[in-house]
């Protein structure tokens, strides 16, 4: 059996991700006809059509989707190999960390603190949406992603979600708002609240809690960023529904105080990695350190 021509596979891989033959040809500095010939040769070698044309767009056939999955694995492994072996001769190691843009900064610092003592490590931090970060992780541009929600698991995913901690969620506010002896229902009726957005698991739990207590709270702000919720609580806009770790400095100073009444509500924190043949050894060191302090 003749060996596969991996140049043909790479051309297919590029077009499959672009979804446009003309754009890919221009990016690769090839004529459109030359690129079409390369893909046709791969189709002949595999014995299947890989694309079907709908209008001006190319769409993968079932065989094309299977081929793309294998091509992603092949070229990702090659990139990973080059990066790993290239880094072996460097005096400093690089750790690339992505974090959900709305994630608690205090949690991120606590997780990354062991790295600060490693003088030979260069730390690269990136923030973004969950989709952006997971795509970067899959594309080998990140070594680990910090988030508060584990990615969906299926047979096509190579993500591994490591649960780092689960922080209780409480009402946080200025001391003047928290009268002695007030129960949770009374507090929620008396004060406006700062809550996460509707897509948050904590928000769903808070709404269910209010329904059980037969309380309709006044929403002062609906925020998707823990750092902003912290600032709004400091500005005395209302009582914030937050894990205490987000405001641990303010709690220590007495500027804000916590009520532990929201029993049953918690925020989970995860470190997400991708299965690799050549994983960054620093990731395992961080995960081990987190497990020791869990």
Image: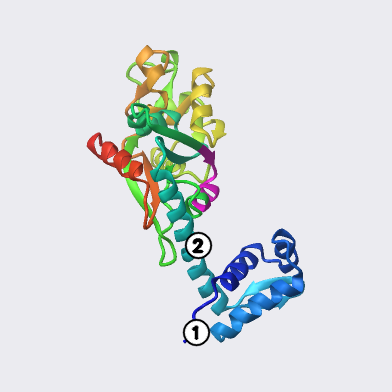
Residue at 51% across, 30% down: 194
Is 240 in front, or is 9?
A: 9
Q: Which residues are magenta?
A: 126-135
Placement of 203 over or under 274, stated as above or below: above
Residue underneath mark 2: 75
Placement of 2 over or under 245, stated as above or below: below
Q: State which quadrant residue 24 falls in.
A: bottom right
Residue at 72% across, 75% down: 54
Viewport quadrant of the C terminus: top left
Placement of 161 over or under 227, stated as above or below: below
Placement of 177 over or under 211, stated as above or below: above
Q: Residue furthest front?
A: 89
Residue at 50% across, 62% down: 75
Q: Residues within 10 Å of mark 2 (few under 14, many from 20)?
A: some
Residue underneath mark 1: 2
Does the magenta run of residues contain 19? no
Does the magenta run of residues contain 127? yes
Q: Circles 2 and 1: CB distance less than 8 Å?
A: no
Q: Is residue 179 left or right of residue 29?
A: left
**Majority secondary structure of magenta residues:** helix
Task: Measure the alpha-carbon separation of dots 2 and 1.
Answer: 21 Å
Tag of residue 112:
none
- SS label for mark 2: helix
Q: Is residue 193 left or right of residue 170?
A: right
Q: State which quadrant residue 106 falls in.
A: top left
Q: Position of residue 291 (x, y in %)?
A: 25, 40
Count of numbered badges drawn on the protein? 2
- SS label for mark 1: loop
Residue 241 visible, this angle: yes
Q: State which quadrant residue 293 falls in.
A: top left
- Which of pointers 2 and 1 lies earlier in the amino acid sequence? 1
Q: Position of residue 102 (x, y in %)?
A: 51, 36
């Amino acid at each position: 059996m003749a060996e596969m021509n991996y140049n043909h596979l790479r051309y297919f891989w590029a077009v499959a991700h672009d979804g446009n033959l003309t754009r890919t040809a221009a990016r690769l500095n090839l004529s459109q006809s030359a690129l079409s010939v390369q893909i046709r040769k791969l189709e002949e070698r595999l014995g299947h059509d890989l694309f079907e044309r709908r209008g001006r767009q190319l769409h993968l056939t079932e065989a094309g989707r299977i081929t793309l999955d294998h091509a992603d694995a092949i070229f990702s492994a090659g990139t990973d190999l080059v990066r790993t072996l290239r880094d072996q001769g460097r005096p400093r190691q690089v750790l690339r960390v992505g974090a959900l843009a709305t994630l608690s900064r205090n949690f991120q610092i606590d997780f990354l603190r062991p790295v600060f003592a490693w003088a030979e490590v260069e730390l690269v931090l990136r923030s973004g949406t969950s989709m952006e970060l997971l795509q970067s992780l899959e594309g080998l541009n990140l070594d680990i992603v910090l988030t508060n929600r584990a990615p969906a698991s299926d047979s096509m995913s190579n993500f591994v979600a490591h649960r780092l901690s689960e922080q209780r969620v409480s009402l946080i506010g200025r001391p003047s708002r928290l009268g002695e002896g007030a129960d949770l229902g009374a507090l929620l009726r008396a004060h406006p609240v700062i809550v996460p957005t509707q897509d948050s698991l904590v928000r769903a739990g808070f709404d269910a809690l209010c329904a059980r207590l037969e309380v309709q709270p006044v929403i002062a702000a609906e925020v998707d960023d823990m750092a902003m919720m912290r600032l709004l609580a400091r500005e005395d806009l209302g009582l914030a529904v937050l894990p205490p770790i987000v405001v641990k400095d303010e709690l220590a100073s007495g500027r804000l105080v916590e009520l532990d009444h929201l029993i049953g509500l918690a925020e989970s924190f995860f470190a997400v990695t991708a299965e690799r043949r050549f994983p960054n050894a620093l990731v395992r060191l961080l995960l081990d350190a987190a497990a020791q302090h869990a």
